[in-house]
Amino acid sequence: MRTRALRDRVEPFLPALSAVVASALALGGLTAWTAAGAAGSPAELSVTHARVLQPFPGRASTAVVFTVRNEGAADDRLLAVTSPAVNSAMLSQDADAGQAAARMRMIGSAPVPARGALEMTPYGTDVMVELREPVRLGERGPFTLHFQQSPPLNVEALVVRHSEWSYP
């Protein structure tokens, strides 16, 4: 009889007790995640390979490529590239047009994965620019990369021949 009386007193508190235990477990898990450095870790971006492909004679449009490395734990997105050396700059990507041909399409952004890289190429994702003035081989031009989460990055891109362009 005493067991039943004790159970009758404890039973109304069981739902509240299970909520308290669940909250304590969740809080403990979040605390461990934060202590391990995973919570709120931002993207950590750097540019390691910035190249302007020298335009063909008589042309002002060309491709600019960058390798954007992300050592952080959060994804980010490249939204735009600007430069005082260009009239316009647009993110673009080659798309398969069939029969071993490709066509260029403009894109709104490009992913920079956590603990990974966005490796631009003239045959994949790049930045199509219209240069203000002719450029010479070996010159460097200023560019600013704008991201969704991270602050802008200022870099200098080296002018190279198409035949001298190489992957990072």
Image (tube, helix red, strand yellow):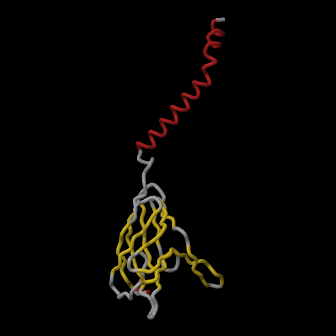
The residue drawn where x is 43% and y is 43% is 34
Looking at the rendering, in which quadrant would you find the C terminus?
A: bottom left
Horizontal and vertical percent position of residue 1 = 66, 5
Horizontal and vertical percent position of residue 148 = 47, 61
Q: 94 or 79, which is in the foreground?
A: 79
The residue drawn where x is 38% and y is 74% is 143
In the image, residue 50 sits, relative to residue 60, either above or below, namely above
Among the 4 quarters of the image, the one containing residue 45? bottom left
The residue drawn where x is 47% and y is 78% is 88
In the current view of this chain or complex, which residue is farthest to the top?
Answer: 1
Horizontal and vertical percent position of residue 60 = 45, 87
Among the 4 quarters of the image, the one containing residue 86? bottom left
Horizontal and vertical percent position of residue 107 = 55, 72
Using residue 134 as the reference point, say whether residue 111 is left or right of it: right
In the image, residue 112 sits, relative to residue 59, either above or below, namely above
In the current view of this chain or complex, which residue is farthest to the bottom?
Answer: 58
Q: How many marks?
A: 0
